[in-house]
Amino acid sequence: MSTILVTGGAGYIGSHTVLQLLENGDQVVVLDNLCNSSFESLKRVSELTGKEVTFVEGDIQDSSTLDDLFSHHKIDSVIHFAGLKAVGESVEKPLLYYRNNVYGTLVLCEAMAKHNVKNIVFSSSATVYGDPTTLPLHENLPTGQPTNPYGQSKLMVELVLRDLYQSDNSWNIAILRYFNPAGAHPSGRIGEDPNGIPNNLMPFITQVATGKREALSVFGDDYDTHDGTGVRDYIHVEDLANGHLKALEKLSEGVGLVTYNLGTGQGYSVLDMVREFEKQSGQAIPYNIVPRRSGDIAACYADPKLAKEELDWTAQKGLAEMCRDSWHWQSNNPNGFK
Ligand code: NAD
Ligand code: WQD
């Protein structure tokens, strides 16, 4: 049994991961400033597991909060989810994104070093590959040029972590590059709860299904893909969460710095998603084709072999479960956690 600090643990991927850590018998301390989440998610995680989570409301940029936290809890490893993730907002407010995501991670790593906690799993993103010139995306490919400050902030943190490891190889660091998370816990009690108009495809579709939005805007049907709409590697959030438990096991072997894609290896188009969602939910999803969204790429999917070989991890759930569980969550909680 270990004690894991989960930054951003009240959020979408964090709450699903906290649930699995508790089920695994780990102790969990969550640090979250609730800027994009609600404490209700953690209450429900406790209800679902029958186990307690220690919650600290605070910011990763605040070194005194971190000092206190590491002094009061004997932390073995950190899973670092805390970050801002809205691509469009990052273009409007680059300084906010670099401060929160890059500076925040520096403060966290400094506190970890000070308290001799040197195991970290970091939430990176497939966005670090930039606009792919070859598919599927393998971890050995050079990172590309992310098209927005959010993506740049993820790439910058990857570089910081590499330099940190170079300087002190007693660190164990797992960089996990997520593809497109979707789905929710099958109980329908926790799930994705975006503020305002969703940027991502699945939450937009579910809000059309509940009648909160009139129609989906499909951003372009003239890409070089099987039906002209954008292709992505959607991965069930429970599979993604499980990847973090596998990464922690790997770190405990003293591996140094490792980087893994967490994706299924399958690409689906926007219209594939719409059709599968309609099938699973029984709801019609009206849509309009509109011009491409700036910064979007045609297609992106993972080569997931390395995580299979080294972590013994493969995604177990497919599009049907992602659509069914997202709908179950959204239809039971039309206003999210509010
Ligand atoms: P989320 O917004 O639901 O969760 C992030 C959590 O971090 C929130 O609870 C938020 O309140 C908290 N937070 C943000 N800044 C903080 C700070 N300075 N101090 C303390 N807490 C802070 O997002 P998510 O989808 O669960 O994403 C988790 C991580 O995974 C993020 O780093 C995100 O960039 C990364 N990621 C997400 C996706 C995706 O599509 N969801 C894809 C790739 C990578
Ligand atoms: C998926 C597909 C859109 C909304 C972004 C970030 C990435 C990662 C995940 C995380 C694309 C199309 C979408 C809509 C649409 N971020 N779409 N209508 O763009 O692959 O990745 O989220 O933290 O860094 O860039 O995901 O869900 O926004 O879009 O047609 O209303 O759906 O064009 O083809 P994306 P997405």
Image (tube, rainbow, N blue to C red):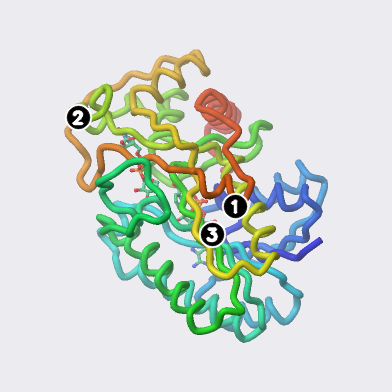
Q: Where 256 sits versus 330, above or below?
A: below
Report the residue that reaches farthest toward the front: 309
Callout 1 amino acid: Glu
Callout 2 amino acid: Val
Circle 1 crowding by C-alpha within 10 Å: few under 14, some 14–19, many from 20 = few
Q: Position of residue 191 (x, y in %)?
A: 57, 40
Q: Which residue is mark 3?
A: 81
Q: Are marks 3 and 1 in contact (CB under 8 Å)?
A: no
Q: Position of residue 3 (x, y in %)?
A: 75, 65
What is the number of the mark on residue 286? none
- Secondary structure of residue under mark 3: loop
* Count of marks overlaid on the render: 3
Q: Which residue is mark 1?
A: 310
Who's the residue at 59% across and 81% down the image?
111
Q: Which circle, 2 or 1, is nearer the viewer? A: 1
What is the number of the mark on residue 290? 2
- CA separation in Å, label 3 and label 1: 22 Å
- 46 relative to 58 in the view: left or right: right
